[in-house]
Image (cartoon, rainbow, N blue to C red):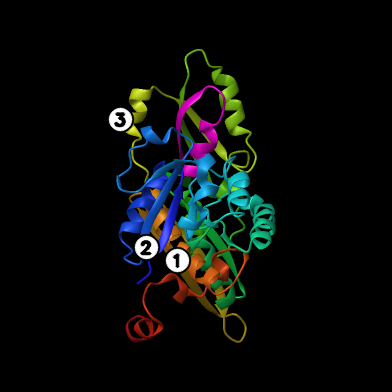
Amino acid sequence: MNKIKIGVMGYGNLGRGVELAVRQNPDMELAAFFTRRDPKTLKTLSPDVPVYNVSEAAEHKDEVDVLIICGGSATDLPKQTPEYAKYFNVVDSFDTHAKIPQHFAACDEAAKAAGHVAFISVGWDPGMFSLQRLLGNCILPDGCDYTFWGKGVSQGHSDAIRRIEGVLDAKQYTIPVEDALNRARSGENPQLTTREKHTRECFVVAAEGADLQEIERRIVTMPNYFADYDTTVHFITMEEMKRDHSGIPHGGYVIRTGTTGVSGETKQKIEYSLQLGSNPEFTSSVIVCYARAAARMAKEGMTGCKTVFDVPPAYLSNRSAEELRAHLL
């Protein structure tokens, strides 16, 4: 069996998660790590896999079937994914929902020009939750959608805070409003605003002498991340961060309530939930499945940008069609 050769760009929480996820998939193997750091200083869990600087990535394009790009959505992925789609089939986890159309267009243009496949916005939201929203809308066309996240750590939001000048470290918790969650589940189809569904709580370690008021202002007014939510900012020490906020749990719910029958007299509800001990490890596990799909689609001659909506479920599995029909259908 020719294994799918996976390259990993970035070795933070998500990159380490990809490394672990590849180990659980016997049809894959790690081919290379790419880092902005000095490669000699990067200690991975896979010492036999070579580490290169990102500046050398294009030189190794023939050694990698799919490059998984593990950067942040705020500033890394909008540049990296279209750029590296010129050289590789790529997968990213871009999670700024409001900017997905623009990111798709940029990646689609680059991937088609190069004859590659580029998957964007792969993970659990966007990703698994997106699929549940699509299914719910198709099955119950007369109904309402509700998505709740948390309580848990959002990697994208935490990364966005860490990029503010004067911030040394940050963790952001997304917290569902319990009353809103119960109303959504009840079937009364409430009209809930973004602010009514979630709150956001931020724990920030600031550099000595940093302007705390300016940091807080930039957080709570940040568009696409915090501006539409009631956001609380706590400044803490690095010791407190390591002691109290070292984990990365998350989860959430996708709910679709609707009616069927002659005159809508029958109430129906679909609810999908996740409870994650590690957000990046789960996200990485999803990404690796779609890396398999990317490799298969590229082998079949497909090109351009794709999302989770574009993949037949069987392409995610390493089992044959016969095995899937026999055991999972």
- Please indicate whether residue 292 sits to the left or right of residue 259 in the image: left
Name the foreground residue: 292 vs 73: 292
Q: Is residue 310 visible?
A: yes
Q: Is residue 167 magenta?
A: yes
Separation (CA) of disc 3 from disc 2: 36 Å
Separation (CA) of disc 3 from disc 1: 37 Å
Residue topped by disc 3: 243
What residue range appears in magenta? 154-174
Q: Position of residue 160 (x, y in %)?
A: 55, 37
Q: Are marks 2 and 1 in contact (CB under 8 Å)?
A: yes
Q: Position of residue 2 (x, y in %)?
A: 38, 69
Amino acid at circle 2: Met
Is disc 3 placed on a helix, strand or loop? helix
For the C terminus, the image quarter is bottom left
Q: Which mark is residue 264?
A: none
* Labels 2, 1: front one: 2
* Labels 3, 2: front one: 2
Amino acid at circle 1: Arg
Is disc 1 placed on a helix, strand or loop? helix
Residue topped by disc 1: 292
Tell me what residue is drawn at x 37 percent, y 24 percent: 238
**Mark before the other along the chain sequence, 3 or 2:** 2
| Quadrant hosting residue 307 | bottom right
Neighbor class of circle 3 (other Cα within 10 Å; few <14, some 14-19, many 20+) is few
How many numbered circles are shown? Answer: 3
Amino acid at circle 3: Arg
Q: Position of residue 247 (x, y in %)?
A: 34, 40
